[in-house]
Image: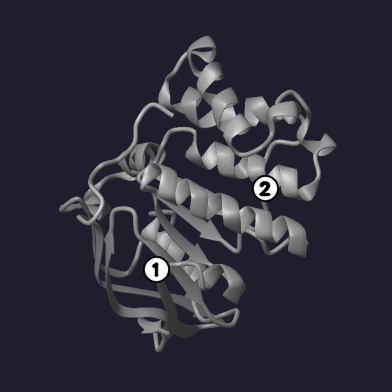
Amino acid sequence: MDRIKENGGSRLIRMENISKSYLNSGAKIEVLKDLSLDIEAGETIAVVGESGIGKSTFLHVLGTLDRPDSGRLLYKGSDVLGFDRAGLAGFRNQTMGFVFQFHYLLAEFTALENVMIPGLIRGYGRKQFQERAEAMLVRVGLKDRIHHLIRQLSGGEQQRVAVARALVLNPDILLADEPTGNLDKKNSRQMHDLLMALNEEYNMTLVVATHSMTLAGRMKKKMTLLDGKLTEIQ
């Protein structure tokens, strides 16, 4: 791609005293409690643990898909939670890439068309952006599937399209929520290898919520949520 980051080792994001709760049948459920975390450029972090401890909530707040009740989210020193809805949408488009357990691709479109969507939202022209999207699909191993409809692809191939879409704008940070949860052992291993290779290649910060201890074991940091706060584990 056109840009490789060179700011490895510097703090990219700081989550400062983040709290988030929900109401369930009138009862307040505190999911994140005064949580703080520094994330460096190029760092790899796995958040592990049982379902229901708040892994997805943590990722959604980190990715500004959900606002916390209190706290600050600093990106290169600026509190992005002060942005309005349009400002946050622009911030996500320019800075974040997202991969979910369910790929959320458009089945009636081709792999190429799906990967081009973030660039078209950014304002790139179709012809201008197509070459970049094709290059990313080649990079994730889909050279021969670029023009196939999503419904013609296997589950592993569809998840690779989702990764290509997340990375096509060369984001500073990739957030992945159970990215191999619907894949078999072989495809899961291939996805693990791909994520780690992309982290190394682009110095891309990678934060993953996962049940896979195999994937977690390849991350620089392995953490879990305990009483609403992140705790590093060995």
Q: Is residue 173 above or below residue 141?
A: below
Please identify the quarter of the rendering in which residue 51 is found.
bottom right
Residue at the (45%, 67%) spot, across then down:
219
Q: Position of residue 63 (x, y in %)?
A: 40, 55
Considering the numbered disc 2 on the image, is that residue within a helix, a strand or a loop? helix
Q: Give the amino acid type for the residue marked by disc 1 in the picture.
A: Lys
The label shown at residue 159 is 2
Q: Position of residue 115 (x, y in %)?
A: 59, 31
Q: Is residue 194 left or right of residue 19?
A: right
Q: CA distance from mark 1 to mark 2?
A: 23 Å
Residue at the (52%, 77%) spot, across then down:
48
Q: Position of residue 87 (x, y in %)?
A: 30, 40
Q: From this viewpoint, is residue 30 visible? A: no
Q: Residue furthest top?
A: 127
Q: Is residue 58 left or right of residue 217?
A: left
According to the image, label 1 marks what residue?
220
Please identify the quarter of the rendering in which residue 122 is found.
top left
Report crowding for label 2: few under 14, some 14 to 19, many 20 or more residues within 10 A (C-alpha).
many
Considering the numbered disc 1 on the image, is that residue within a helix, a strand or a loop? loop
Q: Position of residue 230 (x, y in %)?
A: 36, 80
Closer to the chain start, of discs 1 and 2, is 2
Residue at the (53%, 52%) spot, across then down:
195
